[in-house]
Protein backbone atom coordinates (compact mmCIF):
# COMPACT_ATOMS: atom_id res chain seq x y z
CA UNK A 1 0.00 0.00 0.00
CA UNK A 2 1.11 3.60 -0.58
CA UNK A 3 0.17 7.02 0.72
CA UNK A 4 -2.21 7.37 -2.23
CA UNK A 5 -4.32 4.49 -0.99
CA UNK A 6 -6.94 4.81 1.71
CA UNK A 7 -5.67 5.12 5.25
CA UNK A 8 -6.98 3.11 8.17
CA UNK A 9 -8.90 5.14 10.75
CA UNK A 10 -8.77 4.82 14.53
CA UNK A 11 -12.18 3.08 14.48
CA UNK A 12 -10.93 0.27 12.24
CA UNK A 13 -9.31 -2.91 13.48
CA UNK A 14 -5.73 -2.83 12.22
CA UNK A 15 -3.87 -5.99 11.31
CA UNK A 16 -0.41 -4.89 12.44
CA UNK A 17 1.38 -7.85 10.90
CA UNK A 18 -0.23 -7.15 7.52
CA UNK A 19 0.60 -3.44 7.72
CA UNK A 20 4.22 -4.20 8.62
CA UNK A 21 4.57 -6.82 5.88
CA UNK A 22 3.17 -4.48 3.23
CA UNK A 23 5.37 -1.61 4.42
CA UNK A 24 8.52 -3.75 4.45
CA UNK A 25 7.79 -5.08 0.96
CA UNK A 26 7.21 -1.58 -0.40
CA UNK A 27 10.36 -0.29 1.31
CA UNK A 28 12.47 -3.13 -0.12
CA UNK A 29 11.04 -2.65 -3.61
CA UNK A 30 11.68 1.09 -3.52
CA UNK A 31 15.24 1.04 -2.21
CA UNK A 32 16.59 -2.33 -3.38
CA UNK A 33 20.16 -2.88 -2.20
CA UNK A 34 20.03 0.25 -0.04
CA UNK A 35 17.41 -1.53 2.08
CA UNK A 36 19.40 -4.75 2.45
CA UNK A 37 22.99 -3.50 2.72
CA UNK A 38 22.77 -0.66 5.23
CA UNK A 39 25.80 0.98 6.86
CA UNK A 40 26.61 0.20 10.52
CA UNK A 41 24.53 2.93 12.14
CA UNK A 42 20.82 3.47 11.46
CA UNK A 43 19.02 6.48 12.89
CA UNK A 44 15.33 5.63 13.13
CA UNK A 45 12.68 8.35 13.31
CA UNK A 46 8.93 7.84 13.69
CA UNK A 47 6.96 10.69 12.14
CA UNK A 48 3.28 11.54 12.00
CA UNK A 49 2.26 14.72 10.19
CA UNK A 50 5.62 16.43 10.78
CA UNK A 51 5.76 18.53 7.62
CA UNK A 52 7.98 21.54 8.28
CA UNK A 53 9.85 19.79 11.11
CA UNK A 54 11.12 16.52 9.70
CA UNK A 55 13.31 18.01 6.95
CA UNK A 56 15.53 20.10 9.26
CA UNK A 57 15.81 17.17 11.71
CA UNK A 58 17.15 14.86 8.99
CA UNK A 59 19.47 17.47 7.53
CA UNK A 60 20.98 18.13 10.97
CA UNK A 61 22.07 14.49 11.28
CA UNK A 62 25.66 14.04 10.06
CA UNK A 63 26.53 11.33 7.51
CA UNK A 64 29.18 9.86 9.82
CA UNK A 65 28.95 9.62 13.62
CA UNK A 66 31.70 8.20 15.84
CA UNK A 67 33.41 6.88 12.73
CA UNK A 68 30.27 4.98 11.61
CA UNK A 69 28.53 5.66 8.32
CA UNK A 70 24.89 6.63 8.91
CA UNK A 71 21.62 5.74 7.22
CA UNK A 72 18.56 7.78 8.17
CA UNK A 73 15.27 5.86 8.25
CA UNK A 74 11.95 7.65 8.63
CA UNK A 75 8.79 5.65 9.27
CA UNK A 76 5.81 7.80 8.36
CA UNK A 77 3.00 6.60 10.62
CA UNK A 78 0.09 7.17 8.25
CA UNK A 79 0.93 10.84 7.68
CA UNK A 80 -1.59 12.77 5.62
CA UNK A 81 0.56 15.85 4.96
CA UNK A 82 3.89 16.36 3.21
CA UNK A 83 5.99 14.40 5.72
CA UNK A 84 6.96 11.65 3.28
CA UNK A 85 7.95 14.01 0.48
CA UNK A 86 9.91 16.27 2.82
CA UNK A 87 11.78 13.38 4.47
CA UNK A 88 12.66 11.92 1.08
CA UNK A 89 13.93 15.28 -0.18
CA UNK A 90 16.11 15.60 2.94
CA UNK A 91 17.86 12.32 2.14
CA UNK A 92 16.16 9.76 4.36
CA UNK A 93 15.00 6.28 3.40
CA UNK A 94 11.26 6.59 3.96
CA UNK A 95 8.89 3.79 4.91
CA UNK A 96 5.36 5.02 4.31
CA UNK A 97 3.12 2.95 6.57
CA UNK A 98 -0.49 3.20 5.35
CA UNK A 99 -2.13 3.38 8.80
CA UNK A 100 -1.70 5.72 11.76
CA UNK A 101 -0.99 3.27 14.58
CA UNK A 102 1.23 5.15 17.02
CA UNK A 103 4.87 5.92 17.67
CA UNK A 104 5.54 2.51 19.20
CA UNK A 105 4.34 0.64 16.13
CA UNK A 106 6.29 2.96 13.84
CA UNK A 107 9.52 2.54 15.80
CA UNK A 108 9.07 -1.23 15.94
CA UNK A 109 8.80 -1.23 12.15
CA UNK A 110 11.86 1.02 11.90
CA UNK A 111 13.86 -1.31 14.15
CA UNK A 112 12.97 -4.22 11.89
CA UNK A 113 14.01 -2.37 8.75
CA UNK A 114 17.34 -1.39 10.30
CA UNK A 115 18.05 -4.80 11.81
CA UNK A 116 17.11 -6.81 8.73
CA UNK A 117 18.93 -4.29 6.57
CA UNK A 118 22.23 -5.13 8.27
CA UNK A 119 22.70 -2.16 10.62
CA UNK A 120 24.73 -3.03 13.71
CA UNK A 121 23.61 -0.11 15.84
CA UNK A 122 20.36 1.84 16.08
CA UNK A 123 19.78 5.35 17.37
CA UNK A 124 16.32 6.81 17.80
CA UNK A 125 15.41 10.47 17.81
CA UNK A 126 12.13 12.32 17.43
CA UNK A 127 10.81 14.08 14.35
CA UNK A 128 10.11 17.35 16.13
CA UNK A 129 13.67 18.64 16.59
CA UNK A 130 13.68 18.55 20.38
CA UNK A 131 16.87 16.48 20.62
CA UNK A 132 20.43 17.53 19.86
CA UNK A 133 22.23 15.29 17.32
CA UNK A 134 25.58 16.46 18.75
CA UNK A 135 24.80 14.31 21.81
CA UNK A 136 24.58 11.05 19.83
CA UNK A 137 28.34 10.22 20.09
CA UNK A 138 28.11 10.34 23.89
CA UNK A 139 25.28 7.78 23.81
CA UNK A 140 27.12 5.52 21.39
CA UNK A 141 30.42 5.64 23.29
CA UNK A 142 29.59 3.02 25.98
CA UNK A 143 28.22 0.66 23.34
CA UNK A 144 31.20 0.99 21.03
CA UNK A 145 33.50 0.49 24.02
CA UNK A 146 31.74 -2.78 24.85
CA UNK A 147 30.43 -1.44 28.15
CA UNK A 148 26.69 -1.29 27.39
CA UNK A 149 24.05 -2.65 25.04
CA UNK A 150 21.46 0.10 25.47
CA UNK A 151 22.03 3.77 26.35
CA UNK A 152 19.33 6.36 26.93
CA UNK A 153 19.65 10.10 27.24
CA UNK A 154 18.42 11.62 30.48
CA UNK A 155 16.99 15.09 30.90
CA UNK A 156 17.21 14.60 34.66
CA UNK A 157 20.98 14.25 34.43
CA UNK A 158 21.14 16.86 31.67
CA UNK A 159 18.67 19.67 31.06
CA UNK A 160 15.27 20.52 29.62
CA UNK A 161 13.68 23.66 28.27
CA UNK A 162 10.10 22.50 28.77
CA UNK A 163 8.22 24.12 31.64
CA UNK A 164 5.39 21.62 32.17
CA UNK A 165 5.53 20.78 35.91
CA UNK A 166 3.15 17.82 35.54
CA UNK A 167 5.32 16.19 32.87
CA UNK A 168 8.44 16.84 34.96
CA UNK A 169 6.85 15.19 37.98
CA UNK A 170 5.68 12.28 35.84
CA UNK A 171 9.20 11.61 34.54
CA UNK A 172 10.53 11.41 38.08
CA UNK A 173 7.69 9.27 39.46
CA UNK A 174 7.87 6.78 36.60
CA UNK A 175 11.67 6.68 36.85
CA UNK A 176 11.43 5.78 40.54
CA UNK A 177 8.79 3.16 39.77
CA UNK A 178 10.86 1.43 37.08
CA UNK A 179 13.96 1.62 39.26
CA UNK A 180 12.10 -0.10 42.11
CA UNK A 181 10.62 -2.80 39.86
CA UNK A 182 13.81 -3.64 37.96
CA UNK A 183 16.46 -3.03 40.59
CA UNK A 184 18.44 -0.65 38.36
CA UNK A 185 18.50 3.10 38.87
CA UNK A 186 16.76 4.88 36.00
CA UNK A 187 16.41 8.66 35.94
CA UNK A 188 14.47 9.21 32.69
CA UNK A 189 12.24 6.40 31.32
CA UNK A 190 10.79 8.26 28.33
CA UNK A 191 13.65 10.11 26.65
CA UNK A 192 13.43 9.79 22.88
CA UNK A 193 17.15 9.94 22.09
CA UNK A 194 18.57 6.42 22.58
CA UNK A 195 21.30 4.18 21.22
CA UNK A 196 21.37 0.39 21.19
CA UNK A 197 22.79 -2.68 19.57
CA UNK A 198 20.47 -3.66 16.73
CA UNK A 199 20.15 -7.22 18.05
CA UNK A 200 18.46 -5.92 21.20
CA UNK A 201 15.38 -4.86 19.23
CA UNK A 202 14.91 -8.38 17.92
CA UNK A 203 15.23 -10.08 21.31
CA UNK A 204 12.81 -7.87 23.26
CA UNK A 205 9.06 -8.33 22.89
CA UNK A 206 7.49 -5.08 21.68
CA UNK A 207 3.71 -4.81 21.47
CA UNK A 208 2.75 -1.28 22.46
CA UNK A 209 1.44 0.77 19.52
CA UNK A 210 1.95 4.13 21.18
CA UNK A 211 4.04 4.88 24.26
CA UNK A 212 6.63 2.13 23.89
CA UNK A 213 9.56 3.71 25.75
CA UNK A 214 8.78 1.97 29.04
CA UNK A 215 8.10 -1.38 27.34
CA UNK A 216 11.43 -1.24 25.53
CA UNK A 217 13.38 -0.19 28.61
CA UNK A 218 11.84 -2.78 30.96
CA UNK A 219 12.17 -5.48 28.33
CA UNK A 220 15.84 -4.71 27.75
CA UNK A 221 16.55 -4.83 31.49
CA UNK A 222 14.55 -8.04 31.95
CA UNK A 223 16.60 -9.75 29.24
CA UNK A 224 19.79 -8.94 31.09
CA UNK A 225 21.18 -6.40 28.66
CA UNK A 226 23.53 -3.78 30.03
CA UNK A 227 21.74 -0.44 30.32
CA UNK A 228 23.08 2.98 31.21
CA UNK A 229 22.14 6.64 30.81
CA UNK A 230 23.97 9.75 29.68
CA UNK A 231 23.12 13.43 30.32
CA UNK A 232 21.18 14.93 27.43
CA UNK A 233 19.01 17.91 26.57
CA UNK A 234 15.41 18.22 25.46
CA UNK A 235 14.57 21.51 23.74
CA UNK A 236 11.25 23.22 23.20
CA UNK A 237 9.42 22.15 20.09
CA UNK A 238 9.76 24.83 17.39
CA UNK A 239 7.31 23.53 14.76
CA UNK A 240 3.92 21.84 15.16
CA UNK A 241 2.57 20.44 18.38
CA UNK A 242 3.01 17.38 20.58
CA UNK A 243 1.12 14.19 19.68
CA UNK A 244 1.23 12.82 23.24
CA UNK A 245 -2.09 14.23 24.28
CA UNK A 246 -3.38 15.36 27.68
CA UNK A 247 -1.09 14.87 30.66
CA UNK A 248 -3.58 12.77 32.64
CA UNK A 249 -4.28 10.36 29.80
CA UNK A 250 -0.61 10.15 28.89
CA UNK A 251 0.29 9.42 32.51
CA UNK A 252 -2.35 6.74 32.93
CA UNK A 253 -1.35 4.99 29.74
CA UNK A 254 2.36 5.14 30.60
CA UNK A 255 1.68 3.72 34.05
CA UNK A 256 -0.35 0.89 32.53
CA UNK A 257 2.47 0.07 30.12
CA UNK A 258 4.98 -0.05 32.99
CA UNK A 259 2.83 -2.36 35.09
CA UNK A 260 1.79 -4.60 32.21
CA UNK A 261 5.28 -4.99 30.80
CA UNK A 262 6.83 -5.73 34.18
CA UNK A 263 4.23 -8.43 34.92
CA UNK A 264 4.67 -9.95 31.46
CA UNK A 265 8.46 -10.07 31.75
CA UNK A 266 8.25 -11.44 35.29
CA UNK A 267 6.08 -14.32 34.06
CA UNK A 268 8.48 -14.93 31.18
CA UNK A 269 11.56 -15.14 33.38
CA UNK A 270 9.76 -17.42 35.84
CA UNK A 271 8.71 -19.74 33.02
CA UNK A 272 12.25 -19.78 31.67
CA UNK A 273 13.59 -20.64 35.12
Image (spheres, grey):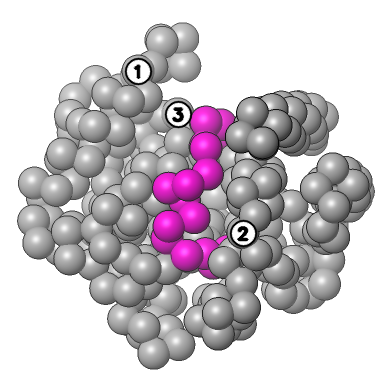
Is the residue marked by circle 1 packed among few (<14), some (14-19), or many (20+) residues within 10 Å? few
* Residue range highlighted in magenta: 194-210
Q: How many numbered circles are shown?
A: 3
Q: Secondary structure at mark 1?
A: loop
Q: Which quadrant does the C terminus fall into?
A: top right
Is there a contact, CB below 8 Å, between mark 3 and mark 2?
no
Report the front residue among 217 and 93: 217
Is the residue marked by circle 3 packed among few (<14), some (14-19), or many (20+) residues within 10 Å? many
Name the residue: 27% across, 46% down.
95
Query: Mark 2 or mark 1, which is nearer to you?
Result: 2
Residue 170 visible to an observer of this rendering: no
Q: Which mark is residue 101?
A: 3
Q: Is residue 56 above or below residue 147?
A: above
Is there a contact, CB below 8 Å, between mark 1 and mark 3?
no
In reply to whether residue 11 is colored magenta, the answer given is no
Q: Secondary structure at mark 3?
A: loop
What residue would you read off at disc 2?
225
Name the residue: 63% across, 44% down.
219
Q: Secondary structure at mark 2?
A: loop
Q: CA distance from mark 2 to mark 1?
A: 30 Å
Name the residue: 23% across, 67% down.
38
Outermost residue on the bottom side: it is 67
What residue would you read off at disc 1?
15
Amino acid sequence: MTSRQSRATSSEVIDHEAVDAAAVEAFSSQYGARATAMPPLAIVIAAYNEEGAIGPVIEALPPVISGLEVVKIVVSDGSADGTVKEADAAGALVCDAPANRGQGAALRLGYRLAREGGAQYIVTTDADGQYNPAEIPALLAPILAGEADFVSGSRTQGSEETKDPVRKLGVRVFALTISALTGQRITDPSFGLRAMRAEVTGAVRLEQPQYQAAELLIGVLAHGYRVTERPATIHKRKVGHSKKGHNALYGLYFARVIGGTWMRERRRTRSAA
